[in-house]
Amino acid sequence: MSEILGIAASGRTTNADYAAVRASGCRFVIVKVSEDDEALSGARTAHFNGCRSVGLPFTGYHFAQPNGKDAVVEAQTFLKGLDGFGPFDLPLMLDLEKDHGLDKKTLTAGAVAWVET
C-alpha cells in the first residue's frame, strides 16, 4: 500500500506557498474552518484560494470542543464557514481530539448530530 502525503492548514499557517507545497509531493490539504461553536478560522480563505490556484485538492475540517455545547450549533458554524468555498475535492471532516470528560455515548451522539446537520 502506498502513502499519499497531505497536510493540515490552520490559522497558525497564514502565508503558505502552495506551489511549493505541491512541488514537495503533497497531494491534498485539510483546512481548519472552525473550532467550537463560534470561532471561524480567518486564514481559511487564503488556504482555500491557495490550494485552488495550484490545483491542489482540499477540504475543510472542524475542530470540535465537546464541552457541553450543542454539536448542531458547532456544525452550523462550520457550514457557515464553508459558504462560498465549494465544491470540495474531499469529504468534509470532523476533528474530535478531546473528550472534556464526556463518556463515549455522549461523544458519539454529539458526533452523529454534527455529521447529520
Image (cartoon, helix red, strand yellow):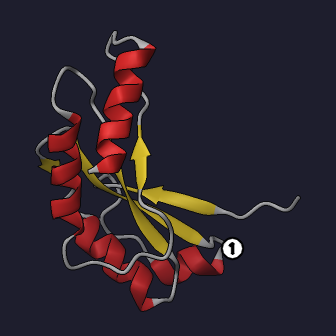
Image vertical order of residue 116 relative to residue 37, above or below: below
Q: In which quarter of the image is residue 106?
A: top left
Please state if 7 lies on the left or on the right of 14 as rendered: right
Q: Quadrant of residue 86?
A: bottom left
Image vertical order of residue 23 relative to residue 8, above or below: below
Q: Which residue is drawn at 22% across and 21% down?
A: 67
Residue that sits furthest to the left in the current view? 38
Disc 1 designates what residue?
A: 25
The image shows residue 27 at horizontal and vertical percentages of 62, 73
Please state if 70 lies on the left or on the right of 86 as rendered: left
The image shows residue 113 at horizontal and vertical percentages of 30, 39
* Residue count near mark 1 (Cα–Cα under 10 Å), binned few <14, some 14–19, many ≥20: few
In this view, the residue in front, 33 or 73, is: 73
What element does badge 1 sit on? loop
Name the quadrant of the N terminus.
bottom right
Q: Quadrant of residue 79?
A: bottom left
The image shows residue 76 at horizontal and vertical percentages of 17, 52
Q: What residue type is labelled 1?
A: Gly
Please state if 69 lies on the left or on the right of 26 as rendered: left
In this view, the residue in front, 49 or 83, is: 83
Question: What is the tally of numbered marks visible in this picture?
Answer: 1
The image shows residue 44 at horizontal and vertical percentages of 27, 66
Please state if 76 lies on the left or on the right of 17 as rendered: left
Q: Residue at x 34, y 12 (%)?
A: 102
Q: Is residue 39 visible?
A: yes
Image vertical order of residue 66 relative to residue 26, above or below: above
Image vertical order of residue 3 relative to residue 95, above or below: below
